Image (cartoon, rainbow, N blue to C red):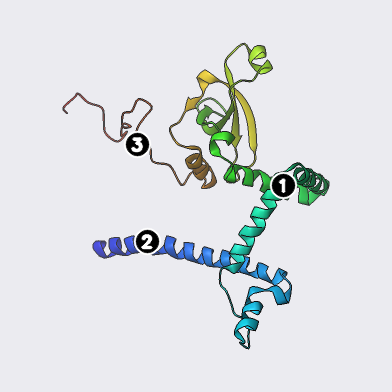
Amino acid sequence: MKRFRRYLVAGLLVWIPLGATLILVKFAVGQMDRSISLLPHKFQPGVMLQNWLGTQNPVEIPGFGVILIVIVVLLTGVLVANFVGRAFVGGWESLLDRIPVVRAIYSAAKNFAEIVFSDSSQSFKKVLMIEYPRKGLYSLAFQTADSLGEIDGRTGDEVICCFLPTTPNPTSGFIIVVPKKDAVELDMTVDEALKMIISLGVVVPVWNRDSAGKPPVDPSIPAGRPGD
């Protein structure tokens, strides 16, 4: 029975992620295919192919909506990359910022998109562990700046600016200025830290070596003399 259960669990660990991925991809493609209905009826690919082939019903083209969405997104990126486009987006965001409920949703979605799709090396420099909210408790934080100008001069210490995200929504959080000597730099990447935060700490990245290049010590093995 133990061997049967082990094989059953091993099989489920293969098929459950694969099935969930296929279902989500199929759902996303289906939703994007609906964007074809936004085109004028006679310019829809299925209708045009129907007229060309002489069939009775429009021809379904799975995945064409994905191509349409990609083209629209690329064209939007080209338009907003110039001065006129940036001015238009600025005016649009200014309008949305005046609507109470929409303002909060748009701001959160924009911040999340900037974190996910921007270059991690430019967004966050390092993953740090700092003592917060009190001494003896540790939190994950991202270093955002190390040259703070007036703050360095006022504190008289070498400090760094950190972003302390909340979980499971890493788009909100706190800006904390901490002494550099009190921050512990971790080996995990920014992407790994974000996955850990979003998963409520369930997804923990594997640590293969410490900063000195040595494998981490297994705390379950008691310390002893060499050769024990």
Tag 1 near tag 2, CB within 8 Å: no
Alpha carbon separation for disc pair 1 and 2: 42 Å
Label for residue 208? Answer: 3
Task: Name the residue carrying label 1.
Answer: 80
Q: Quadrant of the N terminus?
A: bottom left
Number of numbered markers: 3
Q: Tag 2's secondary structure? A: helix
176, 35: nearer the viewer:
35
Q: Earlier in the sequence, mark 2 or mark 3?
A: 2
Name the kind of residue labelled 2 in the image. Answer: Val
**Residue at 78% across / 44% down in the picture?**
84
**Residue at 43% across / 60% down in the picture?**
17
Name the kind of residue labelled 3 in the image. Answer: Asn
Within 10 angstroms of label 3, few (less than 14), some, or many (20 or more) residues?
Answer: few
The quarter holding residue 28 reads bottom right
**Closer to the observer: label 1 or label 3?**
1
Q: Is residue 55 above or below residue 159?
A: below
Q: Is residue 111 above or below residue 67?
A: above
Which residue of the protein is positioned furthest toward the front in this rendering?
52
**Residue at 69% across / 72% down in the picture?**
37
Q: Tag 3's secondary structure? A: loop
